[in-house]
Each structure stands twice: as structure tokens, then as C-alpha cells.
Amino acid sequence: MKRILVGMLGLLVCFGGMGCQKTPEKSLVGNKGEDTLSQAIAATPGAQLPLEAPATWTHTFGSSDGAFSIVVDAAVELPDAGNYPVAKVRKIDLTEAWLKNFIQRLSNGGKVYQFKDETMYTKSEIEEILINLRREQSDPSSDFNSANLTEEERAARAQEIEEDLRLWLEAYEAAPETYALVEQPIKYSQSNTGRQQFSCSLDLGKDTLAYVSVSRSEAGGYVVIANQDPTVGQILSTTEDLQKLDKLAIHPDEAANLGLDFLKSLGEENFAPALVLGGYMQDPGNPNAPREEQPQCYQIFFTRSVEGVNTTYRNTSMDAFLMNGRMVEKAAIMEQYAPFWPQESVEMIITDTGVQYVRWEMPTEQVEVCNTNVALLPFSEIQQIFETQMMVEGLWTNPADMDVIAREIVITKVTLGMMQIREKNTRDGLLMVPTWNFQGYEIYTYAAPVPGGYILDENNQYVNDQLAGHSFLSINAIDGSIINPILGY
């Protein structure tokens, strides 16, 4: 995992300066200092004509020495709608008034209880913990008994388990038989990080209470709803191959509709599924079971639509790694021009029994539609911009992993959809504009296997395809400018 993050981070450090690095003199990449974008938005909406783009795009290019190559073997995905709008949006300020309305709507006016945290275990719950610890000791298939641990590591883990058993047995003596529910007011408290935080338990129709958390800060906020069945735990892994999900009765479309219905119950109408993954969840009763025996689920990311055009889901986790990794360099810039805000998305974990988990990142609302059908650059120009920009920014050496002798970026999907950017000359103004995103994966080639590194194939290669939704490049479809995922423009 460490090498994955280093490899991706190194690449993104290069990409982080997308709008700032010098490009060839004849580059088609748009200059963000020009008024091309604002003029296009202010123009009269054009007629609804289909964009001329192929269904697929195949192309290979790279450095002359073969150390860096880009293979495009991608489906080109266009919106179903024939129009390409631009809209102003704003982040929702999750005030206490908003919080009260949200909680009351979510609970249908039901009672709001104090969240039963990890310090409030009953005797029966501690008994389950003790059973799992002893199972880890005795189960031949547990991580503790696997061949992956050295004798030194196994001895250290054995001491940890014994200490955990001792502490939980002490806690068992003082634990109550049952937990008494305590009602609480809907009111924020101040966290030690400066955020306003609220958490509670709600009865959302299952045998156990749901956990709800809302976080508010100047940089935005998020909402978490955990309403899991007792038979499922945390999600362990995901896959893009939905054919592997042989234990789920519901179809992906049915799961997506369950998610949309949940959003509608909260008053949110303009969402659509943007990325659907399959997943495996931990079975609390058998946590050490092989993955294929664990409960299955769908992990679906929903994004907001504008005038019928969906927003492309971008996995922003690597954007955050870049921000943290270059905080010294970027802090002053980000403070001066704009704080870091992630893209809005709603993640849901859905099983045959319904919605198990929700995380709504940076809730926003549409303010106005600026143009119902703005003119876009021809796809042929976007292709040239992509090749130019990727070659300029892709010729990179990662000093943290000198064992890599060649790197290949494989683009498998090129998508035109809406994306949130910052409005020019504002600190917190936000626009939704049509944007091209280029998603795929990387292949690292090593001279030889590295002790403690990736497990390589027969060609000494590692395929880094574990970040679904990651975009290697985002191009504004209106003016051809490169969107920096950190600064948001």
C-alpha cells in the first residue's frame, strides 16, 4: 500500500501544477487568464446538436526512450442529454437550523438519542468481542495463524491479544446488562479540530439504531449515516467486476434505485449513479472467513445532475494526499485564493436488505443556470490537448521509488460530464461546467523484484488498478484549460 501511495503521489505531484507549468509554444491548452470561459458562458445558448465524438478512442504515445508511455484504449462516454449547461452552485452551510431540519426529516420526527459509543458496551457485546479474540487465537485461517507473519510478529500479536482479553474481561465486570437510551437535543458541539460536530442514534426501522454524524466547518461539511444490519460489518474490498457478485439477489439498477429513493426521502431529486462497484463486507460472526464467503454489497457513488447532465465521479482521495504532501508549498496559495473543498458526492453501501451506509460529502445546491447549452471545443482538439499535456507533465521521475524503470498509464474511459470548478475572481464561487475526465490505471515495470515491495508478474510489472474513479487529467470542455484538482480551477 505504501508504494501505491508513493507512486500515485509522485504522479499527482507532477499533475498538481497542471495550470502552471510551461507548455509548448503551439499548445492548444487554454490559458486560464483569458476570458474565453466567461465569454462562452455569457453567449446565447446554442442549438442542441450531438457532439461529434467516436464511441471508442485508441492511441499510444510516450517518451522516445520507452520509459514513459500512455496507452489510450477507451470507451468515450457522452451525456444522454443533447445540451451542455453551465450552472452556479454553492456549498450548503450546515447551520444548526439545517441540522435540525435534516435530522427531523431523516427520523420522520422520531426521537433523537445519545450515540452509544465504544465506552458504553453491554455484557453481551463484550462477550462477542471476547469470542472473536479467542477465535483469532484458535482459528487456523485467521491472520494471527497465517504464514504471512514471522515468529517475532506472531509473538508480538499474541501478547496484544492476551492484553486485550485481560482489559475486556475487566470491562465485562463493570458493564451493564442493557443500555438505557438517553434522548439528546439537536445541537452542535465544538471538536478539538475546530469543526462543529453532531452525532446521535436514530430508529430508522431496523433492529439496531442507526448512527448519524454531521460535521460542519468553513471548508464545507459531510453527513454519515450508518444503518447496518447486524450481519454485516465494514466493507473490506471492492471490485469493478460486478459478475463476481453471485450472492446478491438485487440487480445493480435496483440497488441504484434504492439509493435514489433514499435521497428523494431527504428532498434531494437531482442525483444519478455515477460509479457502481461491487464489494465484500466483513461478517461479524465469522470475520476471518475467506473473501468469497463474506457478505456482498454494491458501493455506489451518486453525483448531482445539472439540466439532465450527470456529474462525473472523481475519486478525490489522491487529491487529498497531494494537498497533505505539499502543505508547506501550497498552504499560502490555498489560503490566499481558496480553501480546499472536495467535490460533492454521495457514497452508499447497498445490499439486498437496503441502504447500509451513506456518506454525503460537501452538500451543495444549485443557484442558477448560467447557460443551458454552451459551445464546446471539438473532441479532436481535446485529444490534442490531452496528448500535449500528458507528455509535458508525465515526463517524471519518482525519487522515492528509483526501482521503477518504466511506467505506463492506461486510459480505459474518457467521460464528458459536469464538474465543479471555482468561479473566476471569487474565493468561494462555484460553477458546474462540462469537463472531460480521463480515467484508467498504471503499470510499473521494475528491473527486478524488490524486497518488501509489490508482488510482480513474470515481466517484473505491477498493475496499480486499485483506485476506481481516479482521473489522470481533467480538461474544461469549453475552453480547453486544465483543471487543477487541488485548487479547483
Image: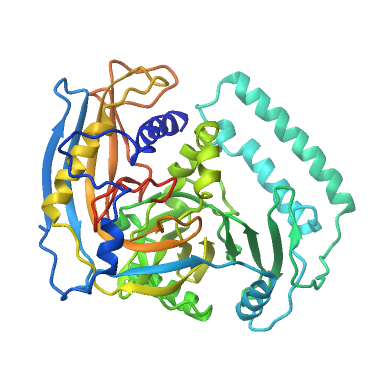
Left or right for 123, reference 392: right
Q: Could you tell me residue 205's position as x and y percent?
A: 62, 77
Left or right for 335, reference 14: right
Image quadrant assignment for residue 395: top left
Q: Could you tell me residue 147's position as x and y percent?
A: 50, 27
Left or right for 46, reference 476: left
Q: Could you tell me residue 297's position as x and y percent?
A: 44, 60
Residue 141 visible to an observer of this rendering: no
- Residue farthest bottom in this picture: 109
- Residue farthest right in this picture: 174
- Visual colour scheme: rainbow
Foreground residue among 476 and 324:
476
Residue 361, compared with residue 262, is above or below; it is above
The mark total stands at 0
Residue at image point 64% right, 78% down: 101
Q: Could you tell me residue 234's position as x and y percent?
A: 55, 53
Residue at image point 49% right, 71% down: 354
Residue 157, compared with residue 298, is above or below; it is above
Residue at image point 28% right, 75% down: 372
Image quadrant assignment for residue 67: top left
Residue 290, compared with residue 190, is above or below; it is above
Image quadrant assignment for residue 201: bottom right
Residue 129, compared with residue 370, is above or below; it is above
Residue 416 visible to an observer of this rendering: yes
Residue at image point 59% right, 62% down: 224
Foreground residue among 401 and 390:
390
Foreground residue among 25 and 213:
25
